[in-house]
Image: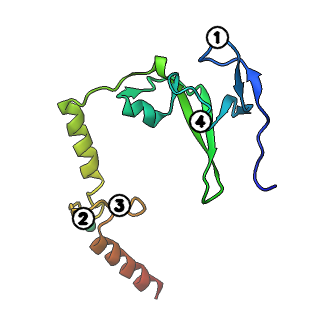
Amino acid sequence: MAGRTFPPLQLATVPWSDAQQYTNGLYEGLPLLAYHCAPRSLLATRRQLRAMDLRPNGFDPVAVLYGRHNRSKKTWFASLYLIENAAPIRPMTPAKWTALAKANLARRICRTCGKDPLYVLPTSTRQCWPCFEANENNDVMEAA
Ligand SMILES: [Zn+2]
């Protein structure tokens, strides 16, 4: 059989319940749960927390959810957080909007000519296309 097989269900002590719960063993030290088998009211992924306007609040995940992607036959994993530990997301303040705008602007400033070509520059060169082309030509001329 292809792919990794997981250990059968086993009872384990888990952070979200006083009683022992069935898990599919451990994955990187955390209880592993199959898709559809995690308690929705107690555990949530980062995106599910976000949908509830919550954040993990600095807590580490307490379990790992796994499933299988039908088309690619790949196993995916998702970290699960305790909903009771989650905190409300912090609202955006004017200072935070400013910082975000600054960071996004910095992604567009060419490192060579210092201009804003109005698109996000590739992280590999941090140059606008004209500057990148000019450099390319220099390299070719040096090599010749
Ligand atoms: Zn440039």
Q: Secondary structure at mark 3?
A: loop
Name the spot of residue 46 as percent of width and height, x first: 46, 34
Mark 2 falls on what kind of element?
loop
Q: Is residue 30 left or right of residue 119?
A: right
**CB of mark 2 near ligand 1 (< 8 Å):** yes
If you read the primary sequence from the N terminus, does the residue marked by circle 2 or circle 3 appear first? 2
Q: Which residue is mark 3?
A: 126
Distance from the alpha carbon under mark 1 to that under mark 2: 62 Å
Q: Secondary structure at mark 1?
A: loop
Query: Which disc number belongs to residue 113?
Result: 2
For the residues bearing labels 2 and 3, Cβ distance under 8 angstroms: no
CB contact under 8 Å: marks 4 and 3: no
Comes first in the chain, label 1 or label 3: 1
- Contact? badges 1 and 2 (CB < 8 Å): no
Q: Residue 102: which disc?
A: none
**Residue at the limit of the structure toward the left, as seen here:** 94
Marks 4 and 3, how far apart in space?
A: 44 Å
